[in-house]
Image (cartoon, rainbow, N blue to C red):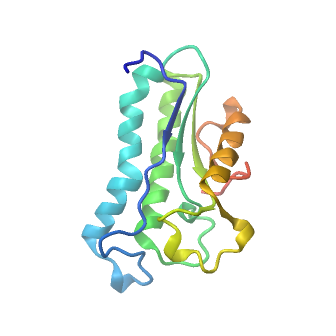
């Protein structure tokens, strides 16, 4: 079905591991083709989507363009290192969306652009890394969706271009 206007767009594509690609634990594990894959999926797709939906989101009503990011994409919060490609691609996503928020503020002033950290969600993406996650910090897909929709519902115009955690707190860049 074709529509002429959108009020909510969610970029929720992400990749952490596949076909022999695993998060790097050291510099020696970094491979250019793996880094390119991380950026293709985790960063570039979101800004291309923002480019394509601008005509549909550019109207007089409040609208939201949200991207699922990850806390590990926070440069200021990086205390453990590792996961070079995933971290860098999520940091790039945050910068691309922050820059998009600035352009959208001129071209579609009622559109809020935000990045969201969903927490550790019980999906195939997190399965191999769940053993050290406390049970109360491992969220079902349904709980994650409810938490993120709650954050989105509380957004104010000044929140555009910001990075939020699942609980509504702002995350550092």
Q: Depth check: give the residue in front, 152 or 43.
A: 152
Picture quadrant where residue 38 is located: bottom left
Is residue 164 visible to us here? Answer: no
Instruction: Point out the residue furthest to the left here.
Output: 33
Total labels: the figure holds: 0
Q: Depth check: give the residue in front, 132 or 168.
A: 132
**Eyeballing the image, is 4 above or below 73?**
above
Residue 63, position in %: x, y?
Answer: 58, 26
Is residue 172 visible to us here? Answer: yes
Q: Depth check: give the residue in front, 83 or 124.
A: 124
- Going 63% across and 67% down the picture, which residue do you hit? 77
- Going 61% across and 76% down the picture, which residue do you hit? 79
Picture quadrant where residue 62 is located: top right
Residue 148, position in %: x, y?
Answer: 65, 46
**Eyeballing the image, is 114 above or below 74?**
above
Quadrant assignment for the C terminus: bottom right
Quadrant assignment for the N terminus: top left
Residue 168 lies left or right of residue 9; in this view the side is: right
- Going 52% across and 71% down the picture, which residue do you hit? 127
**Eyeballing the image, is 43 above or below 57?**
below
- Going 50% across and 28% down the picture, which residue do you hit? 104
Residue 112, position in %: x, y?
Answer: 59, 32
Residue 76 lies left or right of residue 9; in this view the side is: right
Residue 21, position in %: x, y?
Answer: 33, 73
């Amino acid at each position: 079905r074709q529509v002429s206007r959108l009020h909510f767009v969610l970029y929720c594509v992400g990749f952490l591991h596949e076909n022999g690609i695993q998060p790097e634990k050291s510099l020696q594990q970094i491979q250019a083709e793996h880094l390119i894959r991380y950026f293709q999926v985790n960063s570039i797709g979101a800004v291309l989507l923002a480019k394509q939906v601008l005509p549909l989101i550019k109207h007089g009503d409040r609208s939201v363009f949200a991207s699922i990011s990850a806390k590990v994409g926070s440069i200021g919060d990086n205390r453990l290192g590792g996961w070079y490609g995933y971290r860098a691609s999520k940091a790039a996503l945050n910068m691309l969306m922050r820059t998009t928020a600035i352009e959208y503020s001129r071209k579609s002033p009622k559109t809020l652009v935000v990045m969201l950290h969903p927490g550790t969600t019980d999906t195939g993406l997190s399965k191999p890394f769940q053993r050290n996650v406390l049970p109360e910090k491992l969220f079902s897909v349904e709980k994650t969706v409810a938490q993120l929709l709650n954050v989105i519902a509380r957004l104010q115009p000044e929140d555009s271009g910001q990075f939020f955690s699942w609980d509504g707190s702002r995350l550092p860049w």
